[in-house]
Amino acid sequence: MKMQHDASGFTHQSVLLDETLELINASGGGDFIDATLGLGGHTEAILLANDANTVLGIDQDREALKSAGERLARFGERFAAVHANFSEIAAAADGREFDGIIADLGVSSMQLDDETRGFSFREDAPLDMRMDVSTGRTAAELLDEESEETIANIIYKYGEERNSRRIAKWIVEKQGTADAITTTRQLADLVERASRGGKKEKIHPATRTFQALRIAVNNEIDIIEPFLRDSIKTLKTDGVLAVITFHSLEDRIVKQAFRRFSGRCECPPRQPVCTCGAEKLVEILTRKPIVPNEAELAANQRSRSAKLRACRKLAY
Ligand SMILES: C[S@@+](CC[C@H](N)C(=O)[O-])C[C@H]1O[C@@H](n2cnc3c(N)ncnc32)[C@H](O)[C@@H]1O
């Protein structure tokens, strides 16, 4: 596992690095897309695996692109980067086909560690949480504009937070007042107060609410399936798509999408003719998800919920 330091001293440990490289056969030589470039850890390893490899990196965060660009400049034309959401992978590929595509979903440690971005509550900061600060609503705007029910559902669904209803009620009570929730510490304190009396936990009670809001602000769940579909179109025959997830909801979407793309019919069992449109586009390479080994788990806390799944595009 590699620990990366960028120019500003941020660190990020690339998760399931060797396993990902092996699945996409990075040492065999080819053209790859890293759909979540981040600090460029996976990309750097791909570029080092074979002198003929090229990587097109995609990230929606300009800060990440800048750091990765500096780190990977030494690879010259073998590396290129675009500022885009990976839901736009087809446009980013611009008609080219690739031997492998990887995605390492979620936020980077650089984003979490940057106290000005609002992803964490170690310091007080504006409640932003957008990976792409040039577009979309901040978390504070979302909390100001949405109904109590919507906020509760977000916190429950994406954070699996038992106190979601109480937290949402307290947030909405403050909407439109001088005490409206606009900063990270305000939200963390509110969640802590709403969770008092519950059982003691290893993590701060606000962790789940912050995760849930981040997922909602960046629309992280809804774009996964269309991204997977477009990625398969963007691969050459025999090309491999490898996806690392950190949330059970994300992993379920990847698992079910890969099953569908592998031709598994999802029609009701007694239906005589298939109408679900199942098509055999890929072969699944990971019957069970690959998870970090003991050494990685011991060295990198963030890897503990990681799951890697991959599929290979068939001729069709
Ligand atoms: C976990 S980090 C990737 C770390 C990288 N693999 C490494 O080893 O350095 C995820 C990155 O993906 C980016 N990202 C997340 N969702 C994205 C999306 N929908 N479109 C483009 N980039 C996205 C984030 O901005 C972040 O920089």
Image (spheres, rainbow, N blue to C red):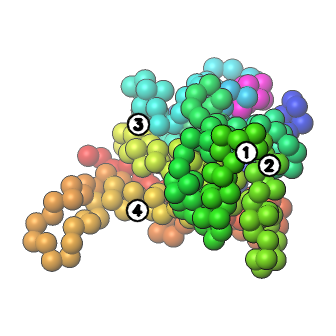
Amino acid tagged 1: Ile
Which residue: 73% across, 28% down? 63
Judged left or right of residue 80, residue 96 is left
Residue 247 visible to the viewer: no
Q: Does 96 lie within the magenta span?
A: no
The spot of residue 261 in percent (x, y) is 33, 55
Judged left or right of residue 233, residue 190 is right
Q: Residue furthest top?
A: 77
Vertical comparison of 276 with 177: above or below: below
Name which of mark 1 and mark 4 comes first in the sequence: 1
- Asked if the residues shown at circle 2 and circle 3 are in contact, with their CB atoms under 8 angstroms apart, the answer is no
The spot of residue 167 in percent (x, y) is 67, 60
Instruction: Compute the Cα span from label 2 to label 3.
Output: 44 Å
Which residue: 66% across, 52% down? 173
Name which of mark 3 and mark 4 comes first in the sequence: 3
Instruction: Compute the Cα span from label 1 to label 4.
Output: 37 Å
User: What residue did someone put label 2 on?
Assistant: 186
Mark nearer the viewer, 1 or 4: 1
Neighbours of disc 2 within 10 Å: few (<14), some (14-19), many (20+): some
Quarter holding residue 166: bottom right
Q: Which residues are magenta?
A: 64-72
Q: Which mark is residue 256?
A: 4
Name which of mark 2 and mark 3 comes first in the sequence: 2
User: What residue did someone put label 1 on?
Assistant: 181
User: What residue did someone put label 3 on?
Assistant: 234
The spot of residue 98 in percent (x, y) is 46, 35
Amino acid tagged 3: Thr
Neighbours of disc 4 within 10 Å: few (<14), some (14-19), many (20+): few
Vertical comparison of 258 with 111: above or below: below
Element marked by disc 3: helix
Name which of mark 1 and mark 2 comes first in the sequence: 1
* Viewer-side residue, 316 vs 93: 93
